[in-house]
Amino acid sequence: MHYYIITGASSGLGIETARLLLRPDQHVVSISRTSPISLVRQAEQTGGLFTHIGQDLSKTDELPGCIDRLMEVIAKSSVQPTSVCLIHNAANAAPFKHLDRHTLDEISASLNLNLLSPVLFSSLWIKRVQPLHVPKKLIFISSGSAEYPMAGMSLYCSAKAGLNMLVRCLHMEQRGLPYGVQVAAVDPGMMDTPMQTAAREAREEQFPSSAFFRQSRDNGLLRTPESVAHLLVQWMSDPASWSEGKRDTIHKL
Ligand SMILES: NC(=O)c1ccc[n+]([C@@H]2O[C@H](COP(=O)([O-])OP(=O)(O)OC[C@H]3O[C@@H](n4cnc5c(N)ncnc54)[C@H](OP(=O)(O)O)[C@@H]3O)[C@@H](O)[C@H]2O)c1
């Protein structure tokens, strides 16, 4: 049984990726605040296994309990895992405004979700899957925002840049270990998802770059999350093609 754990599989790229991975020999575990009901139905119809763990990932003190629930799902299964793959996909770029206009709570919530949670979760997960003698993958959904700064998105851009560096360090720590974790980051490119809608609809006086997001949509530069999910699944299945420890870009594949 191949296990795919996807954070943020209730929307956008996450739900479309989960849809493609729901196959009879695969167990998809989603982690987000909302339960993706359509995936529950799809699993019933296709024979794939699906489990949802309800968790607000910005509540970082709850992450050890969340990992316990995840590992219970794997331990309770009658079929031993043949591989495990964790995809850090959940993120939120909002609220879009200059740093000095954020409340301290907004800053903490943003950095908790977009940076601290994937760091803590990865640390806990690597420890817990260490005894499993199966292939392991740890994938971070990155963004062009990790490299291209934008006024009004300082927290999101900084978090994504931090994750890119985490990937490079983790790769150095894990390579060469017996059953070490294969670590990679991938930039999916611009997709028409609720995250893009929020950027387009942000108030222009707080976020002048909202015009850029509207133009990108109007100029047909956004891909569908379905098409990107296909590329992501293809890319994930072939680690030989990864720039391991670096950031790959789906839109260049
Ligand atoms: N869209 C783009 O153009 C674009 C471009 C480059 C990179 N990316 C990256 O691609 C990934 C997917 O983005 P998307 O566009 O598909 O976003 P999306 O449609 O807005 O989905 C975001 C997902 O994150 C989850 N999430 C948000 N806050 C959460 C929280 N506090 N706790 C748990 N889960 C939370 C949401 O689930 P709940 O609300 O149910 O919790 C949802 O499933 C992200 O990492 C994003 O940075 C997107």
Image (spheres, helix red, strand yellow):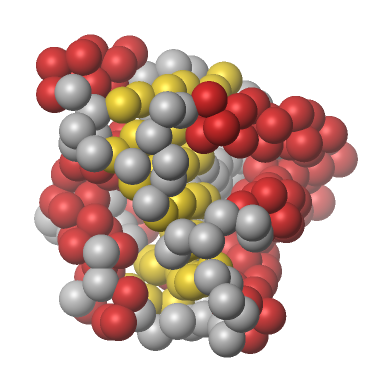
Measuring 86% from the left and 40% from the top, which residue is drawn there? 104
- Residue 106 seen: no
Image quadrant occupied by the N terminus: top left
Measuring 30% from the left and 82% from the top, which residue is drawn there? 240
From the viewer's perspective, is residue 148 above or below residue 75?
Answer: below
Measuring 22% from the left and 78% from the top, which residue is drawn there? 252
Q: Is residue 199 left or right of residue 95?
A: left
From the viewer's perspective, is residue 62 above or below residue 212?
Answer: above
Residue 161 x, y percent position in the rendering: 61, 71
- Residue 5 seen: yes
Residue 186: which quarter of the image? bottom left
- In the image shown, does 112 or 180 lie closer to the viewer? 180
Measuring 52% from the left and 34% from the top, which residue is drawn there? 74
- In the image shown, does 77 or 139 lie closer to the viewer? 77
Residue 63: which quarter of the image? top right
Residue 19 x, y percent position in the rendering: 23, 34
From the viewer's perspective, is residue 50 above or below residue 217?
Answer: above
Q: Is residue 220 left or right of residue 107?
A: left
- In the image shown, does 9 or 196 lie closer to the viewer? 9
Image quadrant occupied by the C terminus: bottom left
Query: How many numbered marks are there?
Result: 0
Residue 69 x, y percent position in the rendering: 64, 27
